């Protein structure tokens, strides 16, 4: 499912030579692009706050210091990286971080899971409100709006051509498989150690819970994974927010442009980082914030998948370079699953 929507986003960007929201604005008008930018920016900034808070809480745990001491340094360093580094530098930094996510695989193994129970529980379905809420959040954090826009931005920034579409599709597929390996490993580690404990309020609590259950090595690996995930996610979230807003208004944009050539782009980027940093200092529970921002993503995604599906099948947008039938099929499957879960959740709320 993730590969399908990412492949279509990539294809739209490669063919049109525009970011996804710029393509939406050109095809469907400024109002729709502004709505997309507003919702994506809200969800991204809230997630930036939660990620900075999570990183800071783990650093505070490791250093035996209040987490607030780390919020401003972490946020400032990442903002400086985005402001001073060009796209190639930022992209290389993010690429170097990706292998470190394998620490989650090691942490899941060290937590000694009962794999027969894991397999049984993977496919358990419920219509209880709490289950539906977390299921939508899980969908929203897997098929997340910012991923679609960042994927499209990468294609534009790296000047991919239509001749490279097949190679690019293979690259997207391998990347999406890797992300799901890491995701399931994280779920297994957390589910084995934390399920039913009721003790987890912060990312630091999650890491700390692994220490007695799975040993100090698992604790250190999980803590390291939280820090790395924040280092990877925050720059992408902040940059994506700036790209989405700039695309809607047709501003000059790009991490390769100096500040004086793309002032509005950088203002949005730094403002998003600043707001996220301030929220992190307000002692808002990062786990709760992460949950509800991903639920918001889960309700936004059907709308975005529908838009991307229409564009990826529109000759005026992609010309003769439509996505393969199997990709379109899985995109429709994704849309259907989101609609079913969102509808069930709405019915529960109405009741």
Image (tube, rainbow, N blue to C red):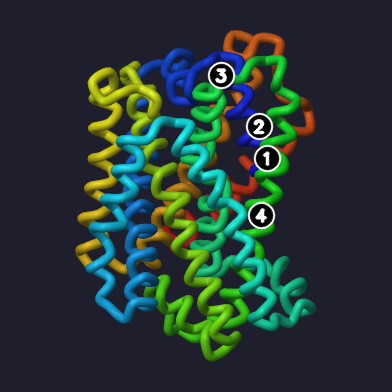
Of the image marks 4 and 2, the number of the one nearer the N terminus: 2
Report how far apart the C-alphas of labels 3 and 1 lie in the structure.
Answer: 21 Å
Towards the viewer: 125 or 4: 4
Determine whether label 4 and label 3 are within 8 Å by CB. Answer: no
Callout 3 crowding tier (Cα within 10 Å): few <14, some 14–19, many ≥20:
few
- Please tell me whether mark 1 sits on a helix, a strand or a loop: helix
**Cα gap from disc 1 to disc 2, whole angstroms:** 6 Å
The image position of residue 116, as x and y in percent, is 79, 78
Residue 274 as seen in the image, left or right of residue 187: left
Q: Earlier in the sequence, mark 2 or mark 3?
A: 2
Image coords of residue 226 (percent x, y) = 47, 64
Give how far apart the Cα atoms at labels 4 and 2 are: 16 Å
Give the mark nearest the N terminus, 4 or 3.
3
- Dot 4 or dot 1: first in sequence order is 1
- Mark in the foreground, 4 or 3: 3
Per the image, the residue denoted by label 2 is: 7
Residue name at image x 66 percent, y 19 percent = 313
Q: Give residue 46's position: percent from left, percent from top.
A: 33, 52
Which residue is identified by label 3? Answer: 159
Q: Are marks 4 and 2 in contact (CB under 8 Å)?
A: no
Distance from label 2 to label 3 (Cα)?
Answer: 16 Å
Whether residue 31 is visible to the viewer of this picture, yes or no, is no
Residue located at (30% from left, 36% from top):
83
Left of 119 or right of it: where is 250?
Answer: left
Q: What residue did someone put label 1 on?
A: 3
């Amino acid at each position: 499912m993730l590969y399908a929507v990412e492949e279509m986003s990539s294809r739209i960007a490669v063919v049109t030579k525009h970011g996804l929201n710029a393509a939406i604005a050109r095809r469907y008008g400024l109002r729709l692009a502004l709505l997309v930018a507003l919702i994506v920016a809200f969800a991204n900034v809230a997630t930036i706050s939660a990620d900075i808070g999570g990183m800071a809480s783990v650093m505070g745990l490791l250093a035996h210091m209040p987490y607030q001491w780390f919020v401003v340094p972490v946020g400032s360093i990442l903002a400086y990286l985005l402001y001073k580094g060009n796209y190639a530098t930022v992209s290389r930094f993010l690429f170097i971080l990706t292998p470190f996510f394998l620490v989650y695989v090691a942490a899941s193994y060290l937590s000694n899971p009962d794999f027969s129970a894991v397999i049984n529980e993977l496919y358990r379905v419920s219509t209880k409100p709490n289950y539906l809420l977390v299921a939508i959040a899980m969908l929203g954090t897997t098929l997340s709006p910012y991923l679609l826009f960042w994927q499209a931005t990468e294609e534009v920034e790296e000047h991919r051509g239509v001749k490279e579409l097949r190679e690019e599709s293979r690259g997207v597929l391998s990347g999406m498989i890797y992300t799901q390996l890491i995701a399931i490993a994280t779920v297994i580690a957390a589910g084995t150690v934390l399920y039913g404990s009721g003790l987890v309020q912060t990312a630091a609590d999650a890491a700390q819970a692994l220490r007695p259950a799975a040993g100090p090595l698992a604790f250190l690996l999980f803590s390291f994974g939280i820090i790395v995930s924040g280092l990877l996610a925050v720059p992408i979230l902040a940059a994506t927010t700036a790209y989405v807003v700039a695309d809607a208004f047709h501003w000059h944009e790009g991490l390769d442009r100096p500040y004086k050539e793309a002032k509005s782009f950088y203002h949005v980027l730094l403002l998003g980082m600043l707001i996220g940093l301030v929220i992190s200092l307000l002692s808002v529970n990062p786990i709760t914030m992460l949950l509800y921002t991903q639920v918001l993503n889960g309700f936004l995604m059907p709308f975005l998948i529908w838009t991307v599906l229409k564009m990826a099948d529109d000759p005026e947008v992609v010309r003769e370079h439509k996505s393969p039938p199997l990709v379109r099929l899985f995109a429709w499957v994704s849309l259907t699953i989101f609609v079913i879960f969102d509808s069930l959740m709405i019915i529960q709320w109405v009741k």
